[in-house]
Image (cartoon, rainbow, N blue to C red):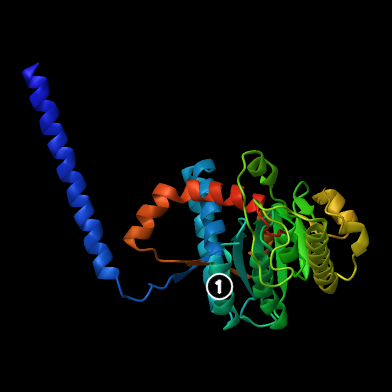
Amino acid sequence: MDFLVEYASFLAKTVTLVVAILAVLISFAALRSKGRRKSSGQLQVSKLNDFYKGLRERLESSLLDKDQLKALRKSESKAEKKKQSKPKPEARPRVFVLDFDGDIKASATESLRHEITALLSLATPEDEVVLRLESGGGMVHSYGLASSQLARIRQAGVPLTVCIDKIAASGGYMMACIGEKIISAPFAILGSIGVVAQLPNVNRLLKKHDIDFEVLTAGEYKRTLTVFGENTEKGREKFQEDLDITHQLFKNFVSRYRPQLSIDDVATGEVWLGVAALDKQLVDALQTSDEYLATKAKTAEVFHLHYAERKSLQERVGLAASGSVDRVLLTWWSRLTQQRFW
């Protein structure tokens, strides 16, 4: 028994020492980074042609016997030498591939803006930008900014193709409609051209327990609906009016970039799968992004761009510890408050 007590005491001391050392290291890192400018990110560029070539070569190595593989590589080498001996061919067109995986805050916009700034410094109207988009929508102002970033590509005269494999609804479709060409997988979800806002009201519960809650404003419509205060019919009407105005702006935006749509037929808040969306002219073709890019790689140089933010030690530790919880709480609370969503 004495041994167990001594062992437990030793273990407790060891754990305490380790925790203390970690706390000192984290504090030291915090002091070093204090006052410094936030470290910038880095643009990562990879050539997808090499990726597709690697996939093919790996499969060939697995399926062909030694003699067949040797003969294939020999023929490829001859073809490459013959190609190099000819006059230098014209440069192949370039395709720049971007990814946007949208959450409720459209957080990926921060990387998207830098990726677009980088490619527009080199891209010409002979090139193409392909956006692989996945988003079910979110906050109005966040997706408004994301859409404005994509509009920069159109304004520069560079062709923009949007590929949707899973979902581009609400704010996601607001981004997608900017593409000169929209390609969707057959069972991707598209549409939801509408606006929604919802919040609970616990005013009657507070009154039941004799709890007063005062809402003081300067400006008649500074606060229309509240969670704790007593809502009025006038406030509801104003809130609905704001939603209707936002919806009309959404419809006008979509109509501007896709004038072929019958906007009143599709701006009902409904969603459609890819096949039905093609009939509604919400998309231009049915195809997966993999098929589209693999085909492009045969005739063009395909580059994938990703702007990665550098995170400090504290940010990395905090992200690992609380990232998932924060996302769950943010989604829950935002859906219950006055935030308006595409």
Q: Of 334 and 112, which appears nearest the observer?
A: 334
Q: Nearer the viewer, residue 3 or 87?
A: 3
Q: Is residue 9 above or below residue 292?
A: above
| Rendered image quadrant of residue 312 | bottom left
Asked whether, in this view, residue 171 is left or right of residue 250, the answer is left
Q: Position of residue 181 (x, y in %)?
A: 78, 67
- Of 298 and 171, the residue lying toward us: 171
Q: Residue at x 35, y 53 (%)?
A: 317
Against 175, residue 23 (above or below) is above
Look at the numbered disc 1 and give the secondary structure of its residue: helix
Between residue 130 and residue 90, name the one nearer to us.
130
Q: Is residue 299 visible?
A: no
Rendering quarter of residue 18 = top left
Residue 322 x/y as whole percent: 43, 49
Depicted 314 relative to depicted 17: above or below: below
Q: Position of residue 264 (x, y in %)?
A: 92, 61
Reply above or below: 244 against 210: below
Total marks drawn? 1
Quadrant assignment for the N terminus = top left
The quarter in which the C terminus is drawn is: bottom right
For disc 1, the marked residue is 115
| Left/right of residue 56 with respect to residue 225 in the rendered view | left
> Label 1: few (<14), some or many (≥20) within 10 Å?
many
Single out the residue that lies furthest toward the top: 1
x, y percentage for residue 84?
53, 76
Q: What type is the residue that disc 1 sits on?
A: Glu
Residue 65 appears in view: yes
